[in-house]
Amino acid sequence: MTRSAWLGSMAIGLAALFGPQALHAQTTPNIEYANVAGQSLRLDLYLPPSGGPHPVVVWIHGGGWCAGARSPLESYAASLPSEGIAVAAVSYRLTSTTPNCANNQGATWPAAIHDIKGAVRFLRANASLWNLDAQRIAAWGQSAGAHLALTLALSRGSPELEGSVGGNTTQSSAVAAVVAYYPPTDLMSLGPDFALSPPNLPGLVSIVDGPNQPHANLIGFGNPGEGIGVLRANANNPNPPWPDLLARARSASPLFWVDATDPPVFLLHGSADTVVPVHQSRRLRDALQGPGLPFQYREINGLGHVPPSASANAEARAWVRDQLRPEVVFGNGFEAGSARLR
């Protein structure tokens, strides 16, 4: 696989691989939740037909942090409103300013996570407008979106990643649960993980470690002569810019945000994924086991970088419905005023 083929798969192949979209009326589209230097950040809100206040799933699209879009909503998430859960599909600043990841002149870390946290705060601040339950919010993402969903969930309370996008800074950006499909979890290990079995593709290591790769561009180190491999080679170099770049790569790796106060995690990855190796999820699985956190790990044999079967998607939806039941959310310490909801 060439570098361009891998980059294309990571950045723009997602939408073409997803199945038919479930039909759900878009209740309130194009809600501006923030404006950053003239760039409007928006979300689409899909509501159950009746009842409430409704729990919410924040849907975060993939696309290598440089492409992708919040609409159309993927079919397995689009069915959530019919199951009583609202969905907020959010946009965030990308690392490319042109379609198809044609450059790396866009936003760098931590802009994207600042945006996502700003969206959650916005939803809490305005929950009464749409009959939402401000305490029962979860996140769900795929690929780069799963990376952001995990970082959102695992880094709650971190001033470094909170930011002030959209204001509402008295509101919490915490979520009560997270579903992550095939996420990058450790940026520094992403290249070397291609040499492991699976996927046993050692030829990709130097490519993925090199310049102009999505995860290198994410931390602002993807120009010619740069890349995560160069950063790894300077891991022990105390001189600038290496300590700051290493800190940024660590900050952008959900693996390093794991602690004993994290919410429940549903983690799914395919063994045949050649875009984000399954070892990225295995690393996070092992880290979650350390503090004994509640999580569910699903590794699907033979699945590539595409959504799983209808039955696996239904399992994920059932899991998130269960995690958002009031007695579960509040039992996990997410009630208003809790020290864990920060």
Image (cartoon, helix red, strand yellow):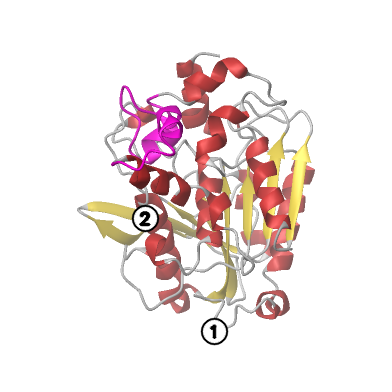
| Amino acid bearing label 2 | Arg
Q: Earlier in the sequence, mark 2 or mark 1?
A: 2
Q: Depth check: give the residue in front, 14 or 116.
A: 116
Q: Mark 2, residues whose alpha carbon is within 10 Å: few (<14), some, or many (≥20)?
A: many
How crowded is the residue under tag 1: few (<14 C-alpha within 10 Å), some, or many (20+)? few
The stretch in magenta equals 211-240
The answer to whether mark 2 and mark 1 are in CB contact below 8 A is no
Q: Which mark is residue 46?
A: none
Look at the numbered disc 2 and give the secondary structure of its residue.
Answer: strand
Label 1 secondary element: loop
Kindly identify which numbered label has been placed on residue 42: 2
Q: What is the distance, in whole Å, between disc 2 and disc 1 at their CAs?
A: 26 Å
Q: Quadrant of residue 57?
A: bottom right
Residue at the spot 64% in from the left edge and 67% down from the top edge: 260
Which residue is rendered at x = 56% and y = 47% of the image? 146
Q: Is residue 132 left or right of residue 249?
A: right
Q: Which mark is residue 336?
A: 1
Disc 2 versus disc 1: nearer the observer: 1
Q: Amino acid at mark 1?
A: Ala
Q: Residue at x 37, y 35 (%)?
A: 217
Q: Position of residue 130 (x, y in %)?
A: 48, 72
Q: Residue at x 63, y 39 (%)?
A: 280
Query: In front here: 252 or 308?
Result: 252
What x and y, as percent, mark residue 20?
Answer: 63, 36
In the rendered image, residue 239 lying in the magenta stretch gets the answer yes
Whether residue 70 can be seen here: no
- Is residue 138 shown to the viewer in this render? yes
**Quadrant in which the N terminus appears:** top right
- Residue 12 locus on image (x, y percent): 47, 29
